[in-house]
Amino acid sequence: MDPSKYIGIFCREAEEHLQALRQGLMALEKHGVDPERMRPLLRSVHTLKGSARLLNLVDFSRLTHALEDQLKDLESGERPVTAALVDQLLAVTEALASLVTAVAVGGEPGFAVDEVIAGLASGTLAQPAPSRTPPIAEEPRAGIESVRTSVVQLDRLVNLLGEVSIVRESFADRSGRLGGLLRQLDRQLPGLRQAEGYPQLRLLRDDLRQLATDLERDVFNIQYLADELQGETTALRMLPLEVITGELEGLLRGMAREQEKQVDFVVTGDELELDRRMLEAIRPMLVHLLRNAVDHGIEAADERRRVGKPPSGRIELRASYEGGGVQLVLSDDGRGLDPEQIRQVAVQRRMLSAEGARALSDEQALYLILKPGFTTREIVTDHSGRGIGMDVVKTSIDQVKGNLQLHSVPGKGTSILLQFPLTMAVINGLIVACEAETFVVPLHYLVEILQLEATDILSEGGHEVVRARGLTMPLVSLQSVLELPKQRSMPVKSRFTALVLNFRGQLLACQVSRSLGVQELVVKNLGDQLCQVRFFTGATVLQSGLPALILSVAGLFGVGFAAGATHLHRELEAQQTRAVKGRILVVDDSVTTRTMEKNILEARGYQVTVAISGEDAIDKLATQLFDLVVSDVEMPGISGFELTEKIRENEQTRDLPVIIVTSYASDEDKRRGITVGAQAYIVKGSFDQGVLLQAVETFIG
């Protein structure tokens, strides 16, 4: 392996971690030591040390190891935080920055690393070593046909393309509305044949029709070009997995040699391409997982022979595309994970009680290794024993909206499955409504969507659970988790929607108001002010142009598996007890007609909402639930026939009964009403309230 081609990546990574160290150390001096401040510092130093070992940067690795020792002493309380100590730690940080600069330009740091380490140990290191910002390594030139650009610029381009997609949807909507106006004009023209300006109206109608056709074609072209641009832009950010597997193999060989172990590393699927930022996020995860596999998993050759294994251990990394994302499986044939030992260590380190440990299944116990500070090592070595490595993995995978599953058989080996989206810039998301709000769930967490009844909710161990496909899973209400105000106007259905989510091998059912379909979405960061907001990992703009927050599935699981009972079953029963007979949407542009129909239906016990046009009705259908629609035909904008067609085209309202009440009495009009999907057609000329009520009760009782 040629380490030189990875120096640029290392310098960029080191600059970010060293800046985080500077800020974190100064925060320690102001606020003192607590786990929330110490864990990020330890993760940064641990990651830098691993990267330096990867590139055989011995001096950098030794210095980060010495800094890590000091930070561990602070975390354990063996040393107090003083201004003098913080000065020394900042001096070491600047010494590391000087080393990075020297590495970047191929020069010498200008100081003796041994002296810095000795000064840190003795407390005599006072003056920071001079440093310069490490330059980004130049990428190979490929002639005048290629140019260099930054990932930040590509991110901006992807975001702009996301805005183009929103404008494209707006054009499509306007094109549809223009078509609706033309159909309305076509219905009005026959009655104007005797009018003075009839020929001019026909010419105007023909011009508008041509304009609508041209606009529809332009919308199609814009959609095609936007899709092509997004695909090409995404491709610019993509790099093959083999960019990092070469250095991983070098790391593995070095570690195996140091520990006098024999290890074969096999990689399949490394030609798969991922977003560059996703690769940079995955690399430290794989470094820590491989270190654990060699140090904890693979046995020494003599031990392997005694248990009937070949002397050389095998670590395999398999990559594949799965469900619109990437799946990595890292497996070894080592000693595996012992669930009972993990329980004992967790109890000894006071991570949970003995009763809590016994309550965990063997599969659940495996995930205790992801907790900060967990380690089965009795002594700290240069490779492990600090309880940081798996915490780095957990934190990194949560940041990229990924998933991790563990499987291990004691004596046989361990398999770790990692799932990621292809890119951190664009995701496929399920749009869900909860009360009056709209949210996004990353699609790779979704197993299925269930339609359940209150009777499907059971209680086990103080938790509400549901059973589906022979499996039992905790149940949470998204409305309760997010503390959203309930919509009093929302009707109570006998069935409710629940998303079955998978995270780290566990299942959770999350109740929402309804699902609204899948979209490809551009991910936008929440910004520094909102980055710590609970239960959300980002934001996006939907195709409708409305903003929506992206839900943190990890946060939902934390609530779902926490102690304490929920009361969703009781709340649903109480709501159904208070529910009205049924909720009806009356759509009519005539204030007289809609008032009369509203009074008739409310007198019979129905809850009625009115809409003054087809567009108004569509808006209300998008934000509220109804049991039935009563609609006029002739209205400004879209007609009742067109409204019925749109109701049938929408997955959420496809089965909603529609009754048309109109003065159009011809057989052709009646046939059209039934053709577009109306269940009943009532002519106003023969209208009486008994006919309307009978039709309503036929469909919703």
Image: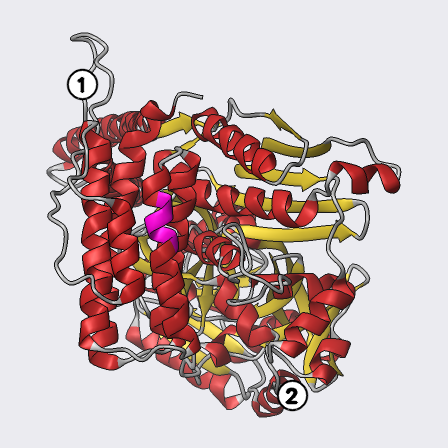
Residue range corresponding to the magenta coloring: 61-65
Magenta: main secondary structure: helix
Foreground: 383 or 592? 383
Q: Position of residue 283 (x, y in %)?
A: 44, 40
* Residue 546 in view: no
Foreground: 493 or 47? 47
Callout 1 environment at 10 Å: few (<14), some (14 to 19), or many (20+)?
Answer: few
* Residue 400 in view: yes
Task: Find numbered disc 1 in the image and state the secondary structure of the residue it sits on.
Answer: loop
Amino acid type, callout 1: Val
| Residue bearing mark 1 | 147
| Quadrant in which the N terminus is drawn | top left
Residue 558 is left or right of residue 33, and the answer is right
Q: Which mark is on residue 573?
A: 2
Q: Position of residue 678 (x, y in %)?
A: 54, 56
- Up the image or down, 236 lies above or below 40; here it is above
Q: Position of residue 366 (x, y in %)?
A: 69, 61
Residue 457 occupies quadrant: bottom right
Task: Find numbered disc 2 in the image and state the secondary structure of the residue it sits on.
Answer: helix
Is 64 part of what is drawn in magenta?
A: yes
